[in-house]
Image (cartoon, rainbow, N blue to C red):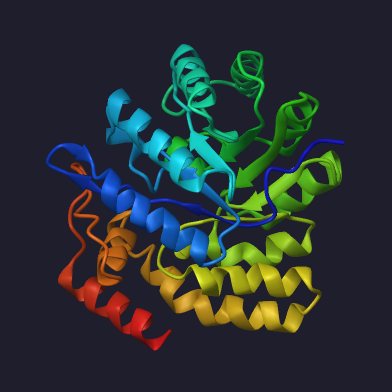
């Protein structure tokens, strides 16, 4: 039986930057806020964390800060994916050495490999580390989809323990659940599909929403797991306006603006992303106040 890294909510953490790089003081403060709010796991250096614009030294800063601040209270999962398998291996080894509890590895983008190539990519990374790996399927960003059949093949590898499914295709999630069974964790990669994925046997969500509404996000999963499905659906639907506003401009543009509204100093996204529009800021502010 494979060990599940977490059940419930993992926050895909945004990264605070200042003129010197990662603002570790603010990051530590935010991580403590997340843990105190009941979050079940933390993801650093992912899409929301702007890993694609971070230097290696900055990634090490962010990982080390998260591992030290969490201090084993909740698992720390590190995004180490790359379109270059060799680079993904290096990133994964570094994260393991820094004390990460697990890895989140996105499909190799841009190169447009085959399904066989995806399998070999993940096999190579998995053999280089011993900690658990969660696959990350987000075709809208990578141009690559992990088919259910490929997912099944990868699930046979001991330390590949689950998938963050952000394809938005519920039929695909259902087929993965059917093929891979209970021994393989499926996490929603879309905040508007938490309850649907849980209903198919999913273990939780890797969430953008929980950056700004951690207690609300946890209410969705906690309610579902205590079999209060009506309550879980209620919270899911209550969260939809905020979820949609956080996707109105490219992630993490809106969520960084929302975090700043909670009295944290996360600055603005790095180019090529730009600051959130004033109109959307107003909408997010109203929604946060209503919560």
Tell me where residue 242 sits by quadrant.
Answer: bottom left
Residue drawn at x 18%, y 57% is 275
Residue drawn at x 39%, y 87% is 290
Tell me where residue 222 sits by quadrant.
Answer: bottom right
The spot of residue 234 in percent (x, y) is: 63, 83
The spot of residue 172 in percent (x, y) is: 70, 48
Residue drawn at x 18%, y 66% is 277
Depth check: give the residue in front, 143 or 66. 66
The spot of residue 288 in percent (x, y) is: 36, 79
Using the image, determine if residue 227 lies above or below residue 134: below
As drawn, the residue found furthest toward the left would be 19
Q: Is any atom of residue 38 visible in this view?
A: yes
Q: Is any atom of residue 251 visible in this view?
A: no
Q: Is residue 97 left or right of residue 31?
A: right
Depth check: give the residue in front, 209 or 177. 209
Q: Is residue 209 left or right of residue 289?
A: right
Q: Is residue 6 left or right of residue 100?
A: right
Which quadrant: the N terminus?
Answer: top right
């Amino acid at each position: 039986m494979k060990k599940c890294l977490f059940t419930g909510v993992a926050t895909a953490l945004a990264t605070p930057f200042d003129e010197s790089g990662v603002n570790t003081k603010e990051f530590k403060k935010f991580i403590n806020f997340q843990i105190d709010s009941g979050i079940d796991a933390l993801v650093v250096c992912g899409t929301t964390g702007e890993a694609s614009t971070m230097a290696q030294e900055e990634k090490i800063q962010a990982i080390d800060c998260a591992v030290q601040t969490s201090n084993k209270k909740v698992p720390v999962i590190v995004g180490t994916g790359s379109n270059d398998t060799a680079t993904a291996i290096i990133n994964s080894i570094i994260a393991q050495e820094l004390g990460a509890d697990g890895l989140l590895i996105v499909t190799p983008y841009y190169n447009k490999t085959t399904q066989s190539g995806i399998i070999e990519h993940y096999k190579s990374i998995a053999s280089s580390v011993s900690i658990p790996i969660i696959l990350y399927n987000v075709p809208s960003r990578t141009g690559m989809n992990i088919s259910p059949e490929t997912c099944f093949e990868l699930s046979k590898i001991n330390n590949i323990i689950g998938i963050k499914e952000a394809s938005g295709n519920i039929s695909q999630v259902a087929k993965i659940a059917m093929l891979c069974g209970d021994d393989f964790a499926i996490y929603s990669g879309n905040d508007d599909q938490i309850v649907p994925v849980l209903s198919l046997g999913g273990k939780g969500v890797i969430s953008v929403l929980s950056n700004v509404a951690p207690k609300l996000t946890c209410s969705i999963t906690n309610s579902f797991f205590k079999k209060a499905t009506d309550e879980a659906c209620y919270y899911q639907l209550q969260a939809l306006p905020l979820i949609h506003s956080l996707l109105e401009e490219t992630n993490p543009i809106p969520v960084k603006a929302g975090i700043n509204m909670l009295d944290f100093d996360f600055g603005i996204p790095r180019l090529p992303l730009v600051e959130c529009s004033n109109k959307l800021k107003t909408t997010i502010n109203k929604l946060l106040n209503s919560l």
